[in-house]
Image: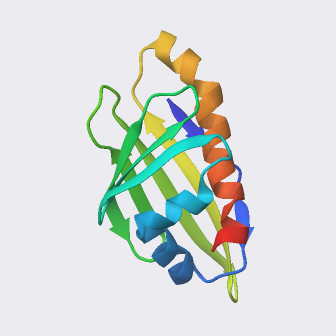
């Protein structure tokens, strides 16, 4: 299952956005209002939970400065990745898009498609005011 967020324009250069996303503590600023827990577990790993959803641990898996950062599931029953793509569009201006990739059975995919789509959309829409 692949889900893409809308692209958002951030008034920063790609390196500034990459640096912000590389510090996993900054993801707390991007989280939706219905977050019930956020905990940093190390330099490259954090745990979060949204109301009514199980806790999820994300770990930084790959970082290609200044255009790509990949977070992946760290433990748990679900294997997925959250990929941030950063493209320079002008002087101190970049487009950012998040892609969620996971391999789920059809029933699970149907259940999580809506909440995950809304979640990645919220993350990316919070970037322009947070970075």
Q: Position of residue 128 (x, y in %)?
A: 71, 69
Q: Residue at x 72, y 62 (%)?
A: 8
Which residue of the protein is positioned furthest toward the front in this rendering?
A: 36
- Residue sitting nearer the eye, 101 or 47: 47
Tell me: residue 7, above or below residue 23. Answer: above
Residue 131 against residue 108 in the figure, above or below? below
- Which of the two residues, 121 or 34, is positioned nearer the viewer here? 34
Image coords of residue 12 (percent x, y): 65, 82
Whether residue 87 is visible: yes
99 left or right of 92?
left
Instruction: Determine whether, in the image, residue 76 is placed left or right of residue 22.
Output: left
Residue furthest to the bottom in view is: 91
The quarter of the picture where the C terminus appears is bottom right
111 above or below 102?
Answer: above
User: With respect to residue 23, does 30 lie above or below?
Assistant: above
Residue 131 in the figure: left or right of residue 57: right
Asked if one can make out residue 4 in the rendered structure from this viewpoint, the answer is no
The single residue placed furthest to the top in the displayed view is: 107
User: 21 or 95: nearer the eye?
Assistant: 21
Residue at 51% in and 58% down: 84
């Amino acid at each position: 299952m692949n889900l893409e967020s809308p692209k958002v324009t951030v008034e920063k250069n790609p390196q500034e956005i990459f640096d912000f996303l590389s510090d996993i503590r900054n993801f707390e600023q991007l989280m939706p209002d219905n977050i019930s827990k956020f905990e940093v577990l190390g330099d490259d790993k954090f745990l979060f939970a949204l109301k009514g959803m199980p806790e999820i641990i994300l770990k930084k898996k790959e970082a290609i400065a200044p255009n790509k950062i990949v977070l992946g599931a760290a433990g748990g029953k679900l294997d997925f990745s959250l990929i941030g793509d950063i493209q320079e569009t002008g002087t101190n201006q970049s487009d950012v898009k998040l892609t969620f990739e996971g391999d789920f059975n059809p029933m699970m995919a149907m259940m999580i498609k809506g909440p995950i789509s809304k979640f990645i959309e919220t993350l990316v829409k919070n970037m322009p005011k947070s970075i």
